[in-house]
Image (cartoon, coloured by chain):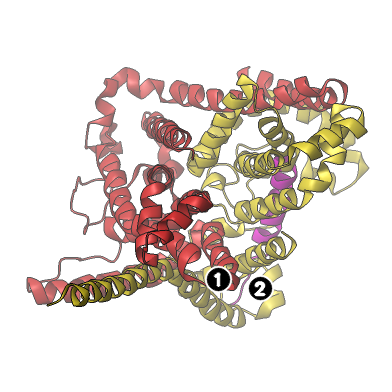
Amino acid sequence: MLGFLLVVLLIPYLIAAYGLLFVKLRWGLRLFGAFIVATIGLLTAMFLVEAYPIIARDGVAVFFQTRWDPVRESYGVLQALTGTVLTSAVAMALAMPMAIGVAVTINEILPARLRGIFGSLVDLTATMPTVIFGLWGLFVLGPFLKDAVNSVSRYLVGDDVMTSPYTLFTAGVLLAIMITPYAAAVIREGYALVPKPVEEAIYAVGATRFEAAFIKLRYVRNYILGGFFLALGRAMGETVAVAMVVGGNFSRFTTNILESGITISSLIALQFPNAASYQYMVPALFAGALLLTLFGLAINAVAIYIIQRGQI
Amino acid sequence: MTAERKAEDITAVRMVINWLGLGLFALLGVAAVVPLFLIIGDVYVKGIDAINRLGGLWHFLTELPPTPLDERGGIGPMLVGTLYMTALGALLGIAVGLPLGVYIGEMRKEKFANVARAGVNVLVEFPTIVVGLFVYAVMSLAKEDLNRYLLGPISNTISPLGEWIPWFIGPLDGFNAYAGAAALTLIMIPYVALITASAYASIEQPLREAAYATAGREFNALFIVLRKAVSRAVLTAALLGTAKIAGETAPLLFTALGNLYYASFTGPTAAVSLWIWYAAQTSYEVQIDSAYGAAAVLLTIILTIFIIARIRG
């Protein structure tokens, strides 16, 4: 019945919103604003409802158990949570230096003619379908990283440390490439807002270009932090590319990034197709989605707060 | 060592640090875009080869996908599904995203506009798989009532009009193209809204006053007069958003599901991205080949839209 109401109300609602645009513009526009807020509210409520059976059965323990054993109806998402944290950590550690490098390269190093082209290339990286990143990770990056890591480790410890090309580390590296543009976009936005007098003052005291870049980066540190959190949100939620290269190991708990693992979003993507055959698996997966939603909301709140606080 | 000499040394050290530091930044910046070229090169080299082996371009674009036993095959149903869902998603996304962008860009002083802006900011960052799950949950609740009260009667009434009607309208399955399009719409809305908002926010105040003075009604001022000032940015937003949703996979996993045949849009629908996701993870050479071919086609579509957006924008 909820569904009936929802769909039957949704269409008249949008028609009403369009009608009001002509009659009383402000109220029409407000309806569109209400639409988006209601969508987010409904989304959270929906996940709470869908995840309720498993939370009622296990309590919050579902987030702190490591056993994922559908046959025994035992679902814990801790290893997926750990995997999300580990892949995001690897990704952020690699992506932030690259994002700062992109911002400095575009604003300080490249001649004006090439800036637009370089910026477009970075934007194109953000527009590329994630499944193509996954395809590349599956057949090129994974095997390459395995060879590279193992040839180093053979030299250092005399043994192969990376037994499979598809590990949490592979996923982290792939994520780093994918999220760099998002962090870079925020840093570039801040970088462009450094006031001209400040820039002139920096050069007037005899700073070299590197020193100037460094001072400006400190000037926009709020944007760097904001970009960090926005990129972190992307890294935690990315699904398809990660699911293709992370190895899909949802049965064994691991904190070694050189082993196969799983993340929350890839757990949902890989397990959902056969979830209907088990009693509690769908609620467990919705609990994972709820967790992702809450993470997303929290990270965004922090990022928006930081950027707005530091508005130059 | 004299003081003068010392100062010169310091300058020399600073110059060396300057070049090393700038070099490091440039290296990091270049490292961020090198993978792009590697990926595009990889997809086109293997993809074009695969398309030739699977039966040439036209065959590849229209035929059914290869089973593990076939030697030839294509991505016909996937291409149709992707185009249909992307077009629907983009149209609806613009229809809702544009007024929403005007609201959060023009009515910034309203408290509720700021709430809506926060909502849009959250939605643009949302994991796309969460959007897909949300649409799946709504669909599974809404499907039965919808079919009984709305779609069943409608399709019974208008089906005599032609053979083609059941392809588009009819009782829905749990997975269908419209659910996929709805998920894509939810992803498209915040893209369009945010770029529209920043375009409207950057209109200079005198221009805005002139628009209100000449247009009469607020509607005319915002959508007719000021349209000239922002149309380019909005068009870019629409194109980039379309490019983005054309390649989305995660939101389609539980909404469109995927299909191997030309089938009605009211049931499980194929998409190029879903086929890449599925075929790349099989162990059959011919299907992996077709995944690479599909990736080349998808990349061509997205590059085309992207380049048009850049030239126009």
SS at mark 1 in the image:
helix
Compared with residue A64, is residue B196 higher up or lower down, i.e. above or below?
below
- Where on the picture, by quarter, is residue B14? bottom left
Q: Is residue A103 magenta?
A: no
Distance from Cα at disc 1 to Cα at disc 2: 9 Å
**How far from the left and from the top, in percent, is residue A296?**
43, 35
Q: Looking at the rendering, in which quadrant would you find the N terminus of chain A?
A: top right
Decide: few, some or many residues near mark 1? Use Cα within 10 Å; few <14, some 14-19, many ≥20: many
Magenta range is: B71-93
Residue under the point 56% across and 52% down: B248
Sequence-wise, the earlier of marks 1 and 2 is 2
SS at mark 2 in the image:
helix
Q: Is residue B87 magenta?
A: yes
Mark 1–mark 2 CB contact (< 8 Å): yes
Three-letter amino acid code of the residue under disc 2: Phe
**How far from the left and from the top, in percent, is residue A3?**
63, 22
Q: Chain of mark 2?
A: B
Say the numbered circle drawn on residue B60: 2
Three-letter amino acid code of the residue under disc 1: Ser
Q: Main secondary structure of the magenta part?
A: helix
Q: Colour of chain A?
A: red
- Where on the picture, by quarter, is residue A287? top left
- Find disc 1 in the rendering and name its residue: B290
**How far from the left and from the top, in percent, is residue B91?**
75, 45
Which chain is drawn using yellow? Answer: B
Residue under the point 59% across and 26% down: B114
Decide: few, some or many residues near mark 2? Use Cα within 10 Å; few <14, some 14-19, many ≥20: many
